[in-house]
Structures are given as structure tokens and as C-alpha cells.
Image (cartoon, rainbow, N blue to C red):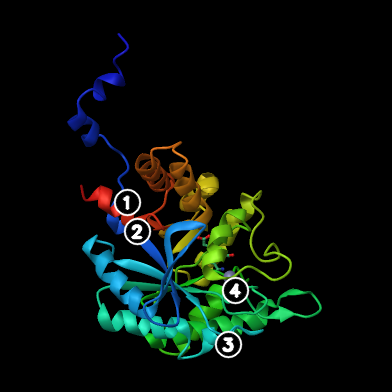
Amino acid sequence: MFARFRRKRINPVLRDLLQETHLSVNDFIYPLFARSGTGIKDEVASMPGVFQMSIDEIVKECDDLKKLGIKSIILFGIPDVKDSVGSDAMCEHGIIAETVKAVKAAHPDMFVVTDLCFCEYTDHGHCGVLDPVLETVDNDITLDNLAKQAVIHAKAGVDMIAPSGMMDGMIQAIRGGLDRAGYENLPVMSYSTKFASAYYGPFRDVAESSPSFGDRRSYQMNPANRTEAIAESVADEQEGADILMVKPALAYMDVIRDVKNNTSLPLAVYNVSGEYSMLKMAAKAGVIDYDRVMMETLLGFKRAGADIIITYHAKEAAILLGK
Ligand code: PBG
Ligand code: ZN
């Protein structure tokens, strides 16, 4: 009598046949944090299972990732020296340039993405050069520096660049800089709709990138704004982005779907540090089944419209998907 939906849920094979959304190891990009030195692999207290690593350890880590079927990483750098402009990020021998060179030399088959921003490199921790009067980031000077940083990453051999600073016009500036330097074939994945979120807290411990004063609300988006969230991604599509992104993911499932429906580009989501740590800490407290909650969450991003998931869970999820 009440069999209309339930008769298709009884047989597990039929359940699998009818599954609408699928998660695959091909969906994942795994974040890694590089610092100078050798033999360094320091776990971060607020993110169990996430490490600051020296370049040699990152190269070794890529062996493990490939064994799990993970073929793409996104790199963040923690420089030895920070200054007002973030010089390390624009230097051919900076931490990210050296990491990209080492990884690509050892693993030509690893698809290496770099996060392109200045907050890890500036002594004030903001995502660009400061305007002394406004006491926030100067948009247009920062655009010039972003283009320089992009060319440094390109020369080092990166496979895709992911600008995360939420400067107006950043995609056009970076695309122009790359094209003029002869890197027309290098794709740009924009952090196109990025909110000023408290969920980045643990990341800033790992990346040592907390702003020394103020916050990022003069460049990252107000979490309350849905129309503007679409407009930000549409603008980056028009400026020439190849892939768009919504970040964070969990509290923004509606925005993921909106951006998917209002653009024609592939869409990434960033399952950010605070989202990861919440599951880790809840599991430690014994209140959730970690594996199941993790897989349900990742599948939810796909259902919402994500094509790519940047996630600290990638290794654990890859193991479960391989079973
Ligand atoms: C740099 C950047 C941040 C993240 C990715 N790139 C931090 C920030 O904007 O403060 C956050 C990632 C995470 O929380 O996992 N702009
Ligand atoms: Zn930044």
C-alpha cells in the first residue's frame, strides 16, 4: 500500500543502481602546508592529521597520496621571513616556488595547484599591500603583485593557480599577467565567492596567517548575502576564470547550488579547516560516527553542485572509497 518509494529501497543492488550522486577520489584536491627545513612534519593541535611539512616531507607525502589515488594537491607556504608586501611570495626562491619545483621534479604526474594570496607572507597578515589611510588592503597595487606572484608560480611549474584574496579584478589581472608571460595554457581556479568566515580559524594556526589587526571583512564577503554571492562568481567567469569556487562549504550549500545554476563553469568547494576540525573533535568526544558523517558531508557537496572538493578529509575518504 505504501510501496511507491520504499519498494525501490529494499534491494541494495537496486539502491546502488538508483543512486543519483557519486563521490569519487577524482573529485578531491588535498591541501598541504610547506615550510623550510628538512625532516619537519609538525601536527597542528587544532587540526589533527594536518601538518606543517618541510619540502622533502611533502615530496614523500605525494607518494602516499598517489597510492591512495589522490592526484591533486593545493599548496600553501609558510615563509621564513614576512614583510609588509609579502616579498617571499614574489621571489623565485620563495617557499612556494621551491616546493612546486621539488614536487614536480619528483612527481611529474601530480597535479599541483597553488593558493595565490599574500596573508601568509605579510607581517600584518592581510591579503595584500596596505593602504595607510584606509588601513586595509589597497586593491590595485595588490593586483600588480598578484600578477607577479602568478608568474613566479608558473615559472616554477605549477599546473593551476588558485587566487584566494578576493580583490576586485584579480582574475583579469592574473590572466593578463600570465598571458603576457606566455602562460596562456595555465588554468586559473578562482576563490570566486569567499566569505569572511570564522570557519577559517584552525587554518590560520597552520598557515600562521591571522591578521595582526582588524579582520578581512573589507575584502571577503558578508555571510548574509546571497545575491552578491552569485554576482561575485559571475564576475570572475566574465573576467576569464576557468573554474569557480564557493568557500566555506557546509554553511553555504544554497550558495553552491546558486553559483552552479547561474554560471557555466566547473565549480569547486572548499571544505575548510573549521569544518574538518568540528568532525575531528566530535569524533574524539565520541558523539559521531566519523567515517559516515564525513562521507555524508562530502556527498552533500556533490549533490549541492560541486565538481571538485578541496578537503583535508581526502586521504581518509579515499581509503573508504577504495574498500
Ligand atoms: C588565504 C586562504 C585562507 C584559506 C584558504 N586560503 C584563509 C583566509 O582567508 O583567512 C582558508 C582555508 C581553510 O580554512 O581551510 N587567503
Ligand atoms: Zn589571504
Q: Is residue 308 above or below residue 258?
A: below
Secondary structure under the numbered disc 3 in the rendered image: helix
Whether residue 157 is visible to the viewer of this picture, yes or no, is no
The one nearer the camera, 112 or 204, is 204
- Residue on which the image places disc 4: 119
The answer to whether the residue labelled 1 contacts the one labelled 3, judged by CB atoms less than 8 Å apart, is no
Ligand 1 closer than 8 Å to the CB at disc 2?
A: no
Mark 4 residue's CB less than 8 Å from ligand 2: yes
Q: Is mark 3 within 8 Å of ligand 2?
A: no
- The Cα atoms of the two marked residues, 3 and 2, are separated by 31 Å
Real-space Cα distance between discs 1 and 4?
29 Å
Q: Amino acid at mark 2?
A: Phe
Badge 1 or badge 2: first in the primary sequence: 2
**Which mark is in front, 4 or 2?**
4
CB atoms of marks 4 and 2 within 8 Å: no
Q: Quadrant of residue 60?
A: bottom left
Circle 1 Cα neighbour tier, 10 Å, few/some/many (<14 / 14–19 / ≥20): many
Amino acid beneath label 4 = Cys
Type of amino acid at the residue the image marks with label 1: Ala
Q: Earlier in the sequence, mark 3 or mark 2?
A: 2
Pointer 2: residues within 10 angstroms few (<14), some, or many (20+)? many
Dot label at residue 317: 1
Please say if the residues under marks 1 and 2 sit with CB atoms less than 8 Å apart.
yes
Query: For the residues carrying marks 3 and 2, which lies nearer the camera in this image?
Result: 3
* Quadrant assignment, res 156: bottom left
Q: CA distance from mark 4 to mark 2?
A: 24 Å
Q: In this rendering, does residue 155 appear at all? A: yes
Q: Residue at x 62, y 79 (%)?
A: 122
Q: Position of residue 8 (x, y in %)?
A: 25, 24
Q: Which mark is residue 87?
A: 3
